[in-house]
Image (tube, rainbow, N blue to C red):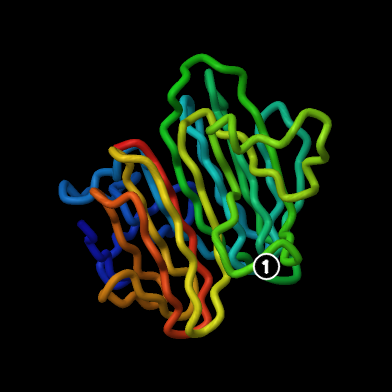
Amino acid sequence: MITIRPAGSLGTAHDGGQVLRCHFAFADYTDPAHGHEGRLRAVNACTLPAGETYRIGPEAAVDIVTWVAEGTLATAMEGFEPDALGTGGLHLASTGSGCAQLAWRAGNKQGAAFIQFWFLADTQGMTPVQETRPALPELEDGGFRILASGFPEDDPEEGESVDDGAPVTLASRARLLHATLPTGEGAAYGTAPERVLYLLVVSGAARIGTQGLRAGDAAAISGLTDITVMADEAAVVLLADVAA
């Protein structure tokens, strides 16, 4: 089953001093029809003016994956060194047993737009972890590339550099994937039964089956183990794969 969530139907939440566009109930946005999708707790989009900060916390037992859609973003997670990300960069805050405060700050010269995926952790009480990855456009081949994963088989071999595109490690048996699709081309993905997929079109226009999606639209997919996403216009898409 494929259920489309149009961009115009998303909720608005006020959290951490900022306004978020939310796919699921979050902060002061309540929506009984869209509480979560399997173990995917939240998908939030935020645009920060130059120099402004989005702060949250305390948080525990959740993996917050932040993907920078545009601009530059500085990260701040309690107990860890700050880091800086550009467009296409990725930040994982695996909050484990608890993290008092997290923050993401837009650069002083330009703002930033980012999308956050919140995955419910499968293992409780773990030590918090931070990981970051730069954008690696040279690895884009038109197919889905794994950005974050809680599956051991997706881990790099011991000693392999994390700069080679290896995914950040989730505390949930979930994946977050990314694809850049030229017009008229597609990307296929296969998963196991009893999984839920959530596809978000970041830019351009894409199709899954006979259903079209524009920038900002999403599709919740259940009961299918194989999907193909086609680009009607050059598109960037993100795909979450979680337990139902």
**What is the x, y in percent for residue 54?**
56, 50
Left or right placement of residue 77 versus residue 126 in this view: right
Instruction: Choose top left, top right, bottom left or bottom right for residue 99.
Output: top right
- Can see residue 134? yes
Above or below: residue 140 compared with residue 77: below
Q: Which of the image's four quarters has the N terminus?
A: bottom left
Q: Residue at x 61, y 24 (%)?
A: 128
Q: Amino acid at mark 1?
A: Gly
Query: Which residue is identified by label 1?
Result: 71
Instruction: Choose top left, top right, bottom left or bottom right for residue 208.
Output: bottom left
Q: Nearer the viewer, residue 84 or 177?
A: 177
Q: How many marks?
A: 1
Q: Nearer the viewer, residue 217 or 113?
A: 217
Q: Residue at x 51, y 84 (%)?
A: 183
Q: Residue at x 34, y 44 (%)?
A: 27
Above or below: residue 182 compared with residue 197: below
**What is the x, y in percent for residue 23?**
33, 56
Q: Nearer the viewer, residue 158 or 52?
A: 158
Give the class, few, some or many, for how many residues have Cα within 10 Å of label 1's Cα (few <14, many ≥20): many
Left or right placement of residue 158 versus residue 39 in this view: right
Left or right placement of residue 119 versus residue 87 in this view: left
**What is the x, y in percent for residue 167?**
64, 43
Q: Residue at x 60, y 49 (%)?
A: 147
- Can see residue 50? no
Q: Secondary structure at mark 1?
A: strand
Q: Which of the image's four quarters has the C terminus?
A: top left
Q: Residue furthest left?
A: 32
Above or below: residue 244 compared with residue 190: above
Q: Residue furthest top?
A: 125
Left or right placement of residue 88 versus residue 202 in this view: right
Above or below: residue 19 compared with residue 16: below
Q: Nearer the viewer, residue 226 or 152?
A: 226
